[in-house]
Amino acid sequence: MRNIFLNRFGLTFVLLLSFICVSSSEASAQVFDERIVDETIFLAKGNKVFASGDYERAARIYQNGLSLRGDKQAIFHFNIGVCHYNSGRLREAVASYQRALRNSGNKYQKAFYALGRAFADLGETQNAKTAWLKALKLSKQTDAEALFDLGLLAIEERVFDAAQNYFEKAAALKGANADLSLNNLGVIAALRGDFETAINDFETAFRQSNEKLVLANRNLGFCRDYVAKKDESLLAKLTIATKTTVSGFGIQTSD
């Protein structure tokens, strides 16, 4: 009788222990899942607040997301950097982008591009160039915005062959800034005396922009007038296009 009781007690104990172990495992799994969900919630909430224009509050939400120490650390740091940039705190933006890069093993293309933009606005053109070249390398030469900005930088440095190369690659991608790149190729061609190419570039830029790039159409007029009148002052009126919007400054909304 005693043995039966002990056996039953032992069986009950084993079953209870098994239940505790299973419950503990389920609880651990639940905690892990909740951590991932919470990270996603912080990211979504921060993105919503960012979209409303409240960059200070969005940065605080992303900062709270960092405390979870999950797999979105680089994204949170990047988004905090974008908030700082949009608030005019360029040094803080640089620091946040650099943290994003460290957390990604320097594999974060958007962070390199945004870092370059912040450096450029600070007047640190060589640091900007280095960052954009790294973004370009990670993108396998397909980062249209990095190509365009490197082209602008090359024009500032009066290295026109390099500028032409960057703008040609950006235009060929037919993405961000393709029409602006064509306009700038037209200016370079005109200044070199190749007016046939310049006119074609200006026409294509205006057409590709759905006739919204007024600058290209104006440059086209100056170029045609020069061919007809040979008035050197017309060439001085040709204008390089710079960007009005930068998609690289957008926050990252997901992995």
Image: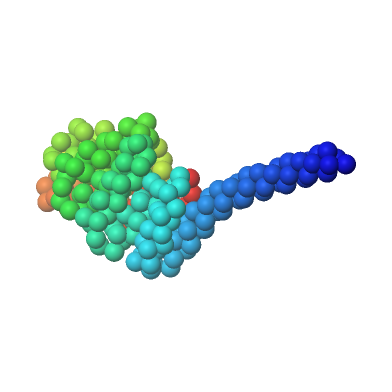
Name the residue rendered at 36%, 61% in the picture.
Answer: 59
Residue 111, x across and y down, in percent? 33, 45
Q: Is residue 219 left or right of residue 230?
A: right
Q: Quadrant of the N terminus?
A: top right
- Please state which of residues 248 and 18 is positioned toward the viewer in this rendering: 18
Residue 79 in sight: yes
Q: Residue 142 in the image: x percent, y percent?
A: 38, 35
Compared with residue 142, is residue 228 higher up or lower down, i.e. above or below?
below
Seen from the viewer's position, the closer of residues 80 and 193 is 80
Give the image quarter of residue 167.
top left
Q: Position of residue 127 (x, y in %)?
A: 19, 42
Residue most toward the left?
Answer: 232
- Horizontal side of 118 relative to 19 (left or right) equals left
Q: Residue furthest front?
A: 2
Residue 94 on image: x %, y %: 25, 51
Give 91 or 109, whichever is nearer the viewer: 91
Q: Nearer the viewer, residue 111 or 24?
A: 24
Question: In the rendered view, would you say 193 is above or below 212?
Answer: above
Side of 174 where 5 appears, left or right = right
Number of numbered discs: 0
Q: Is residue 126 left or right of residue 17?
A: left
Look at 46% across and 47% down and name the residue there. 70
Q: Farthest right residue? A: 1
**Residue 210 visible here:** no
Q: Quadrant of residue 49?
A: bottom left
Q: Residue at (35%, 42%) from the top-left corner? A: 103
